[in-house]
Image: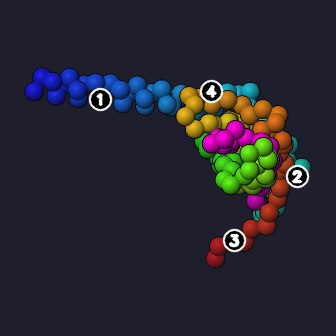
Amino acid sequence: MEMMLKRFTLVIFASLCLFLGGGIQYSHAADLAGQVTLALPRTPAHDEAVRVRISAGVLPRRSSIVVRSMDGRILGTVSPFGVRPGQPSGVYTIPLPERVLKDGKVSLVLQLKQKGAKGVRAPSAEEFLGEELVYIPITPFD
């Protein structure tokens, strides 16, 4: 019985450490070096939505670029699949909620996450080639 109590205590302690440590590791404060601020060319019309197009270069194997809002929420992920080694990963379009469009600007945090690596880092110039804001027409639901 005493052995089970010790194991239970160890499991609870380990879970708490993982929970607390994991939350900090992926917060937007973890790496503001990947911060990107874009100016909106104009205010979107009532029947338009704003998207960001991310051009990704050559990414390390089993890695992705996580796109977050400044409050740390994940907006989307550039996660290439089937790209040949050494080839650019392509262009990915990520929807932007209205809450990230502030004062005519969009601020995002880009983080490179590698499977098996601890933490995240900002993508390099070879991994992140650029971004642009695009407007797309939307149809309201009736």
Badge 3: how crowded within 10 Å, few (<14), some, or many (20+)?
few
Categorize mark 2 by other alpha carbons within 10 Å: few (<14), some (14-19), many (20+).
Answer: few
Residue highlighted by disc 2:
42
Q: Is residue 1 covered in magenta?
A: no
Q: Nearer the viewer, residue 43 or 130?
A: 130
Q: Decide: marks 2, 3 in contact (CB < 8 A)?
A: no
Where disc 1 sits, the SS reads: helix
Which mark sits nearer the N-terminus, 2 or 1?
A: 1
Q: Which residue is mark 1?
A: 11
Image marks 2 and 1: residues in contact by CB distance under 8 Å: no
Question: Marks 1 and 3, how far apart in space?
Answer: 49 Å
Instruction: Return the disc, 2 or 3, that comes first in the chain's sequence.
Output: 2
Q: Which mark is residue 30?
A: 4
Q: CA distance from mark 2 to mark 4?
A: 31 Å
Q: Mark 1: few, some, or many residues within 10 Å (few <14, many ≥20)?
A: few
Q: Residue furthest left?
A: 1
Q: Residue at x 63, y 42 (%)?
A: 62
- Which mark is drawn over residue 103? none
